[in-house]
Image (tube, rainbow, N blue to C red):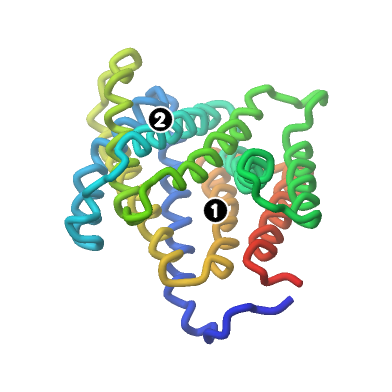
Amino acid sequence: MRLASREAPSTYTGGILLMCVGVACLSVNDAVAKTLTTSYAPLQILFMRNVIALPFTVLLAFLLGGSSALRSYRPAAHLLRGALWVGATIMFFTSFMYLGLAEATALIFVAPFFITVISALFLGEHVGWRRWLAVLLGFVGVLFIVRPGGATFQPISLLPVATALVYALLMLSARWVDPRETVWTLLVYLTGSGALLGALIVPFVWVPIRAEDIWLFAAIAFFGTAGMTMMTQAFRVTPAVVVAPLDYTGLLWATLFGWLIWRESLDTMTILGAAIIIASGVFMIFRKKGVVV
């Protein structure tokens, strides 16, 4: 294995740190969301997160991207992406009500495999046999965790897998966005469209928010926005092949939070399945970037 870039590894420190901290922030976001699902519907949690985060997201985009970051050339594309994001997040938060945090997190990591399959079958992209093998192994990892037909099988385990599929569509839908728009524009409109769409249906599931829970809603807004911002910036300043594999550190955080807060533990099959998914995903990242020969 060799590195394609000639840049000194020391120049990657900032991006690596941003990615690691960003992933940790999103893991905190997920842990807080799981806590809130005991009292509130996933849609209400997401709606409150977007409403609280939107002003800060707009300010952040303006400071980092200028006034042009607030302009969209294809608002309909952002609205569709918002619908995909709302759907994916609701399914993911719903899975928290029935599954352990680490188990749900491990299953959502199959999103890159769905991206590869959709790109090959519907977008005409070339995928070599090695990446197809990685996709196959990734789904074998899913079978280890879900165990369909086994005594411990829960249909709800398929929900994070469905989340990964919708999330893959969300990532691919970025191609519909006007190329003149920046990542900060995507961040603003994703948050804004999520808040708008949530406002249309949240009245049907709304329950009064307890005063002691307000800080939890503020926490998911803060950690969710901070995590997305830092991870976005990490990809801007460091080659993707360096920082993308660090996304899998989220499983370590999910396992830690799951044990500390809910005393959750992973069985051997789940650990093995997660290891297969991560190994296959990391291989695909390196293969796509031309690092593995």
Vertical placement of 182 versus 7: above or below? above
Q: In the picture, which quadrant includes the C terminus? A: bottom right
Residue shown at 50%/27% (left/top)? 94
- Which sits earlier in the primary sequence, circle 1 or circle 2? 2
Residue that badge 1 annotates: 250
Q: Residues within 10 Å of mark 1 (few under 14, many from 20)?
A: many
Q: Residues within 10 Å of mark 2 (few under 14, many from 20)?
A: some
Q: Nearer the viewer, mark 1 or mark 2?
A: 2
Q: Is 117 placed left or right of 203 in the picture?
A: right
Which one is in front, 126 or 29? 126
* Residue 92 position within the rendered picture, expressed as x and y whole percent measured from the top left: 51, 33
Q: In the picture, which quadrant includes the N terminus? A: bottom right
Which one is in front, 153 or 282? 282
* Residue 18 position within the rendered picture, expressed as x and y whole percent measured from the top left: 42, 66
Q: Is 194 placed left or right of 101 in the picture?
A: left
Residue 214, by quadrant, is: top left
Amino acid on which the number 1 mark rests in the picture = Gly
